Amino acid sequence: MARPHAPVTVRGLVKLARPKLAVHAVVESAQAPSSLCNMKVPTLLEVDAYDVPSFLAARIALIHKVPEDFALALLREAKRMLYLSVVSNDSIAPPDRVDWAWHEMLMFTRWYKAYAEFIGAFIHHDPNPPSGDMHEETWEEIQANLGKPTPGTDTYIKTKNNYEKYFGEKPNPLYWP
């Protein structure tokens, strides 16, 4: 069984309507505060089209023993999750599968910095303390459990609701169980 979805709380460094306390991640403006007013926020289509390093999906596929097309889709969902944290200014909690992609994205520091500038905020990742159950899902388990909802924190449920609210579509259960 995978660990429960841990919340990641975001807080903007400029004055926001609903500031949050930083718990697991902090959103830092990639721009100077005075230039935020003129900053263009990308669209979801632009976020989805933002290129990732050429072998990033292959790396995820190899490390986590999943098909490369699944790894590529996880990257798309991780880019969306980071973007969601910016546009919603709300706490986020990714599923472990999407978190795999986020971890690998962080390994490409120059690319991650450029993506942060593109979405308008740098999202720091502070890992959760280890739990007694650190089992990572296998590809076979992912397929076997497709369509079966997993228990999640209130923040995870809220993240999925915000995904639908801000993106106009339900999160795909293959990536967001």
Image: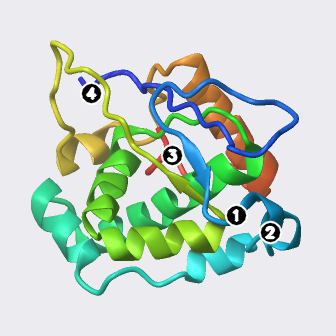
Amino acid type shown at disc 1: Ala
* Above or below: residue 152 compared with residue 111: above
Q: Which residue is mark 2?
A: 35
Q: Earlier in the sequence, mark 3 or mark 4?
A: 4
Percent across and percent down for residue 88 are: 75, 45
* Mark 2 vs 1: CB contact within 8 A: yes
Q: What residue is drawn where x is 80% and y is 75%?
A: 40
Q: Earlier in the sequence, mark 2 or mark 3?
A: 2
* Tag nearer the camera, 3 or 4: 4
Q: Earlier in the sequence, mark 4 or mark 2?
A: 4
Percent across and percent down for residue 173 are: 51, 46
Q: Which residue is mark 1?
A: 32
The circle on residue 173 is 3
The Cα–Cα distance between marks 4 and 2, rounded to whole angstroms, is 42 Å
Q: Which residue is mark 4?
A: 2
Q: Residue furthest top?
A: 132
Which scheme is used to colour this image of the protein? rainbow
Indicate the secondary structure of the residue bearing disc 1: loop
